[in-house]
Image: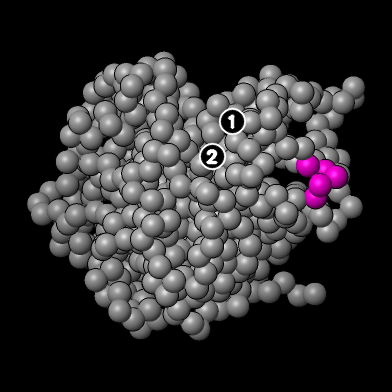
Amino acid sequence: MESSGLQPNTEANVAPLPPNDAVMSLRLGTAKTVGPARIRTAINKQPQKGLVQITDLGLVGDEQCYEFHGGVDKAIHQYCSSHYQTWNEEAPGRDHLFKIGGFGENISAAYMHEGNVCVGDIYRLGKHVLVQVSQPRQPCYKLNHRFEYKKTSKSCQNSGRTGWYYRVLQPGCVAEGDKIELVERINPTWSLSRVQNFLYHDPGNAEALAELSYLPALAAELLSLFSTRLIQGVEDMQGRLVGDVAPTAWRSFKLVEATSLTSRVKRFVFVDADGSMEPADTEFSAFAHVRLKFGPGSCYSRAYSVVSGTFERFELGVALDDNSRGGSHYLHNNLMVRNIVQVAKGKQGIAAQDSIETEDIRKHIFVIGGIGITAFLAEIRALMNSTVQFEVHYAVRSRRGACYLDSLPLDRTTIYAKDEGRRLDPSSIIHGPSKKMVFDTKVYVCGPSSLLDACRNLTTKFGYPRSRTHYESFGGASVGKGEPFEVEIKRTGRILPVPQEKSLLDVLVEAGFDVESSCLVGNCGTCMVDHCGGEIVHNGVALDEEQKETTMLSCVSRGKGRIRIDCEEV
């Protein structure tokens, strides 16, 4: 088959020269929290008047959100200001977001774009600064949050309206209004648009990959990517576009059923009151949660495990917390049938069916305490309809107070009732690998922190890999308190002690840092901060495993020794 679009030496692929252009806007900034999902990003940049110094790492004073971003190949980002009109036509009602500076560019210019700028182009900015085009920007999920439009990253990639990066060849100073002049073009047939074509749209084109793997001046990151594709095939790009969580989209739901299951647990059924939901948006993943806003002025924000249903009609089981700060108390005593609450999908994992159909897992073991049963009911039901081995260990105060017992298979469930003198001992349930050192059992745990700690200590001791454990927490009054530790603030170097009786959130707020919070038990994710170094003991359910690599919940998670975080002072 003929290569699609690869004609390296023909005039058809020679990019036009860009018209004379100038720096319309020059911007820099620090990391901030943006969007309804509260994503940490350095995309918010402010215009600068007067001369701005440029070094080999970019504009002096411009900050990257994470330490592994930026670098010499991504020192400066430029974006075509003419693209914003197209964005506003595509996604109306967001002209306050789709405007110059919206994509976090350092430089905005009107006439240069991905079709007339080539990899390796050398430009003079002002009188002295020389920069070289290193690569097109690869859009990621944070753009979805930035513009509150879930198709932003995908549309950006498909259209090629991404902007591009420069490396700095000759430092100096630049000001708004300075000319941008093309000095040299070394790859006239490799416009950014053409590189993007083989990066995203024709990614398996071997002839193109061979040439791109050695393209002069292309960033090392992309040289490696194209070389790897030649050997291993095309990578999965979906995670970069979608990210850990989708933009938070709140919908109105009506309470249609409220039934007491026990003296402490109530069953709530909600139905979508907005209507016109896309079919694909109605499905939940495995271990699904929803976030609820309710109460006067939506003053409460809580996350709950979905017991059953779809995002059109779902069931929750909510226990009345002995130490309620208002959330569960309000649901149990004030929320009435026909009342409206605001609901958004919580963290979403893999597809429900995929979570149980793993060939190398021989047995699934569920270790559950109290209302923690709601976290795994959907998974247990799925296993009941399969041939996979599983067992349920359920610790309760009493059988009379145990909820959802009728949903569990009696032949595979062991009840540990406190009033009967039966105690759940994790060490009698969780064992090490087989004699061949094969971990063919997966352990699921949800309950109070004491149960989670005991099980986590065992799986750590036996060397269980991350893929063979799944932990969820429903919080508790003691969560967030524990062994003392110290926290260093990245941007100032300030060190704060976190005593045994206080949470990190308590200490940060008292010290004058701008950290919002809501649920205080690790359910909603509002209080998360960037984790930059040190060992973290994670608690709560708002973060998935990948998010835990770079963030922590300040209301419930703690450090060991000294940790390093990043957050903003008021």
Outermost residue toward the left in this view: 50
Q: Which residues are magenta?
A: 409-413
Position of residue 276 in the picture relative to residue 425 (left or right): left
* Residue 364 image-quadrant placement: top right
Q: Nearer the viewer, residue 520 or 41?
A: 520
The residue that label 1 is drawn on is 452
Mark 1 and mark 2 in contact? Answer it, CB < 8 Å: yes
Position of residue 333 in the picture relative to residue 190 (left or right): left
Q: Secondary structure at mark 2?
A: strand
* Residue 527 image-quadrant placement: top left
Q: Secondary structure at mark 1?
A: helix
Residue 246 part of the magenta-drawn span: no
Q: Which mark is residue 473?
A: 2
Q: Distance of mark 1 from mark 2, alpha carbons?
A: 8 Å
Total numbered labels placed on residues in the image: 2
Instruction: Confirm whether residue 378 shows in the render.
Output: yes
User: Label 2 neighbourhood size at 10 Å, few (<14), some (14-19), many (20+)?
Assistant: many
User: Label 1 neighbourhood size at 10 Å, few (<14), some (14-19), many (20+)?
Assistant: many
